[in-house]
Amino acid sequence: MTGQAEYNDPRLVALYDLQNRWSADDGFFLALANGQPGSRILDLGCGTGRLTVALALARHRVTGIDPARASLDVAQAKPGAEAVRWIHGTAEDAPEGAFDLALMTSHVAQIFVEDAAWAEVLGHLHRALVSGGRLAFDSRDPAARGWEVWDSGDEHEHLTLPDGQELDTWTKVEGVADGRVTFTGYTHFPASGETVVDRSTLRFRTEAELRRSLVVAGFEVERIYGGWHAERVGEGCGELVVVARKPR
């Protein structure tokens, strides 16, 4: 797993929430969950808890798991967070046979760069679901080549955090090879002169690769959409939105 600073540095966690507000992806996963009222839901890689808390407020029984302590601290301070069971850990810490639905949102699936790590997390999710339980997650479609617009070039974004700190951010794409995209995020704090450098690698798996990995892990693939409005793959917004099921 790479790119840890944005999840572990409290200043960057605040920036994450500023840049990532509720959007169509959250609406998709919330609607999916609401199709089965009162579900027991695992939100793996819950981060700062934007969707996690919304699921709990919709009267689901929710467990949020994340390895980043700073992100969990922010999540647990949000209104409604007391209704969530928060776990500082990884998929390995998910209880067995405890969930009707497991979610990995905000492209958490792409953090597992190596196939062995991806297979391991799928195995843990399969174990954590009840018979007939579902798994849903998003992963960017490599065919859309979304990384081509990530590089900021000479343009920096100037932002102000809720505590009044000002900063500038920019991104450089370092390399694209074998389904892996490596990029570096820069965050400069003018007041202190400090620049935080966060280098990350994400895995872009094709639809076929995702299907194969899910079948090997014991899942049945129900649907793969190309966007947040149930578009066909290649006709949406460059996403692969996966819904799979643990067979009964």
Image (cartoon, rainbow, N blue to C red):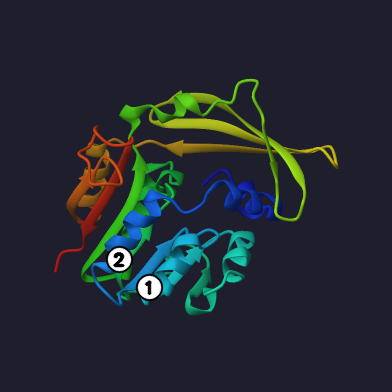
Above or below, 155 against 242 in this view is: above
Image-based side of 193 in relation to 123, left or right: right
Q: Residue at x 37, y 77 (%)?
A: 59
Question: Sequence order check: which comes first, mark 1 or mark 2?
Answer: 2
In the rendering, at what x and y percent does residue 47 appear? 53, 58
In the rendering, at what x and y percent does residue 43 appear? 41, 64
Residue situated furthest right in the rendering:
192
Residue situated furthest top in the rendering:
154
Q: Quadrant of residue 143?
A: top left
In the rendering, at what x and y percent does residue 122 appear? 33, 56
State the CA–CA distance, disc 1 to disc 2: 9 Å
Q: Quadrant of residue 247?
A: bottom left
In the rendering, at what x and y percent does residue 209 appear? 26, 39
Above or below, 222 against 184 in this view is: below
Q: Residue at x 34, y 31 (%)?
A: 142
Return the mark for residue 33: 2
State which quarter of the image contains the C terminus: bottom left
Nearer the camera: disc 1 or disc 2 = 1
As helix, strand or loop, the secondary structure at mark 2 comes to helix
Image-based side of 8 in relation to 214, left or right: right
As helix, strand or loop, the secondary structure at mark 1 comes to loop
Q: Residue at x 30, y 61 (%)?
A: 31
Return the mark for residue 58: 1
Residue type at mark 2?
Ala
Near mark 1 (Cα within 10 A), the count class, few <14, some 14-19 or many ≥20, is some
Residue situated furthest left in the rendering:
248
Please say if the residues under marks 1 and 2 sit with CB atoms less than 8 Å apart.
yes
Q: Residue at x 33, y 35 (%)?
A: 238
